[in-house]
Image (tube, coloured by chain):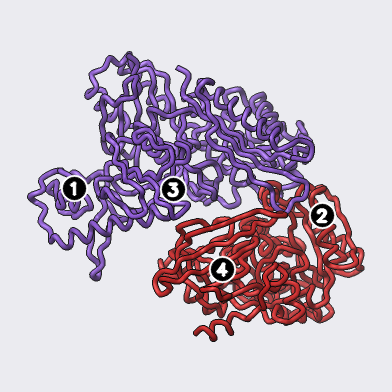
Chain colours: A purple, B red
Amino acid sequence: MIYRLGIDVGGTNTDAVILDNKNNPIAKIKVPTTKDVSTGILRALDEVLKGASVNPEEIKYAMLGTTHCTNAIVERKNLAKVGIIRAGKPATLSIKPLISWPNDLIKEIGGYTHIVKGGHEYDGRELSPLDEEEIRRAVEDLKKKRVESIAISSVFSPVNNGHEVRISEIVNEIMGEKTPVSLSHEIGSISLLERENAAVLNAAIINVADTAVNSFENALKERGIHASLYITQNDGTLMSAEYALKYPVLTIASGPANSLRGGTFLSGLKDAIVVDVGGTTTDIGILLNGFPRESAVAVEIGGVRTNFRMPDLISIGLGGGSLVKKEDGDIRVGPQSVGYKLEKEALVFGGNKLTATDIAVFLNKVKLGDPSIVKLDRTFAEKVNEKIKTMAEDAIDKMKTSPEPVPVILVGGGSILLPDKLKSASKVIKPSHFEVANAIGAAIAQVSGQIDKVFSLEKRGRDEVLKEAKETAIKEAIKAGADPKTIEIVDVDEIPLAYLPGNAIRIRVKAAGYLKI
Amino acid sequence: MGCYQENNREYGKKGGDIMRSLDREDIENLAVGATILGTGGGGDPYLGKLTAIQALEEGYEINIVDVKEVPNDAFIVPSAGMGTPTVIVEKIPRGTEVINAFETLSEYLGRDVYATMPIEAGGLNSTFPLAVGAKRGIPIVDADGMGRAFPELQMTTFHVNGVPVTPMALADERDNTVLLKTCNNYWAEWIARDITVRFGGTAWITLYSMSGKELKKAAIPGTLGVAEKLGATIREAKENRESPIEVLLEITKGKGLFKGKIIDVERRTTGGFARGKANIEGIGEHKGQTLNVQFQNENLVAIKNNKVIASVPDLITLLDLETATPITTESIKYGQRCFVIGIPCSKKWRTKSALEVVGPKYFGYDIDYKPIEGVMEEIG
């Protein structure tokens, strides 16, 4: 028998599951997330192994969704000193790299920058040729400044990545093969500053990812597990541990993506809204063809504007640990929460704080702790219950794209708060194993390949460029480890460029398939 | 807010101007306010804001001068970016493009430039002239030619008041410069659009050069100051977790038109324009009513119960009901709760000849323009 292990770190809890080869969960566990993240992961690992009684050697795949990288950026901890090279001269000089960054973050990463000649036009013409001598001088300077990690961006690199690739070769030649290099075209899409920011963040967390992945790998080995290790990324697919070490920034927001993928797997629905109620927050996302809908707007991470794909989410301050208060006759639920201390501080567990979970227990929606010690006014409890329902309904409505009712899948430990009927939902599904949907989503995830590029239609037809885009996406998916037989095109997006005579089109294609086992 | 101070530059002394210099916070405010004046379109003022912030960090000063302080014989040259936003966000300007365009125009006309200014107060082009003025060592006039955002070069109060677009200079980052002189402003728009393609999708332009006397007649004064105030109000309200909408209406003399939820959006792209309409179902005091907003990059008309209650050139802006963040026409989507406000346009747009350029008929609506204040009074 071959087993898979899935672990996902949430804001409040770290969840783990072990699936058999038919994808049935044979063990599942939730433990509190710890401040250092790793301790919580190891505890979850041990607990789930204890519950599974499988031979560790039979666990052949391990999937990890972690918040190490997000936390490092937000807390400005353990960040590498970064050198930045942008190819774009003579253009782009009016806005240098890092101009919009928070000062405390710049201080942590050093932020030595060079803008050199290079880059391309939207139609693939060279903006200006690379000057190798100039690049060598820039790299020598960064070497002298002892930067640990290099980020490279280039104008229109999503159209032509040649300059970024050539600069990275020079970096490795001068600073050694081991110097980590983050190329912007591998991470973000059109929009130079946001893509460059994402590459710089990636360069800054390279050591964090290294530590996180290695310590997890070692922990597995210590427990006799010799599995291929995969890390989940924020489009709901997997990357190999090796790739994750190069592009750790793609792990940011992988948790909500895992919940969405878990939701589609557990319910069998490919198009639906997934409501993930955790301990402190509720994340609402949309499944399109089984994958998270991506956000169309720039996303800020730790005060830095980036544009790499992220699930389109609405997050509200509602969770199992949300504090319930009466204020001037109004009822308030959240955003304050007891979080992972629920089992100490909630009334039902003998604590002294009234939480959303207490209301659910009092109204017999769930059996937990000691219901007899929760004494409440029934009318009040029902009002709170109604408030919780409305909060979720309003947020669901904001995520919808049309007035037609859509299926809603409830996952996450806190989803016990919500009823079986919701306004504007065609049906409400609470699948089994809903409380560990994120860990299941990690364990069953697929691998994908993507392209986002501007094509000129002056010499070629639309069908031809679309075909090329699809083939490239499929190739990328195979490169990432997908079984060619299972690869499907899961998303195609075409955007004509406005105000521009001469017919240019931006095409994004994503292909995904199951791991080649 | 920036403090008023004596300017010690030479031109300052000559004109006896009182100028105001902008700091980083003023620029941030201006960029937020410009999204409101963008009335749903115009692009994101974000990039221009960053060029201005970099200019400050490099030690340049951004000085703003009032229209009434500009000497009648001074030579004013507005500056702007032209092209598709998708290229502008990728191929960020070098910073010298507009300077080159200035030199070219200045040389051709044999005159020194006294000040620059934006041609539009909303969107992308509201913030770029700040860094241009700073680096050239000239002030930016607190005025523009639209008081909002519009999509074409001739849609300005300059055009309506007889200021020609050309001679116009277009420049790129490679030091290519084109000097353009056309028989009328429509030809200027048409030819310039093609040059932007050869430049790689964007051109940096100087155009509508005029005297201080013409400026006073043709420009809409005080619009940068208004944008700054709007931005400051929104930022303060956000910090205090209050709704800034009342104050926004007070500053702009605007009217609250409708409160509701977007229930339907329809879009089609034709000839480089994103056209469409949104239906908004009333909530609160507007429960049971529907507002229909139609747009072409910018919001054009608002129709309530089959009656047009606001139309171009008056400004129609959708604000997020909770945060008062303006909602662009590209990002309108089902389920958003919004507050629709109408802002009276400049009086300069309300003449017969001006309405021929930017009135509802120009955009294909067979309706007569009625000032928003009048409509509001009529329907109470």
Q: Where is residue B349 in the image (x, y as percent from the top left)?
A: 70, 78
Closer to the camera in the image, B10 or B233: B233
According to the picture, the residue beneath numbered tag 3 turns out to be A313
Disc 3/disc 1 C-alpha distance (Å): 27 Å
Residue shown at 67%/66% (left/top)?
B149
Closer to the camera in the image, B260 or A357: B260
Q: Quadrant of the N terminus of chain A?
A: top left
Callout in the foreground (3, 1): 1
- Mark positioned earlier in the residue sequence (4 or 2): 2
- Report the side of A293 relative to A379 (left or right): right
* Residue projecting furthest to the left: A372
Disc 2/disc 1 C-alpha distance (Å): 68 Å
Subunit of label 4: B
Badge 4 amino acid: Thr
Residue B27 appears in view:
no
Q: Quadrant of the C terminus of chain A?
A: top left
Badge 3 amino acid: Leu
According to the picture, the residue beneath numbered tag 4 turns out to be B317
Callout in the foreground (2, 1): 1
Q: Position of residue B312 (x, y in %)?
A: 65, 72
According to the picture, the residue beneath numbered tag 2 turns out to be B171
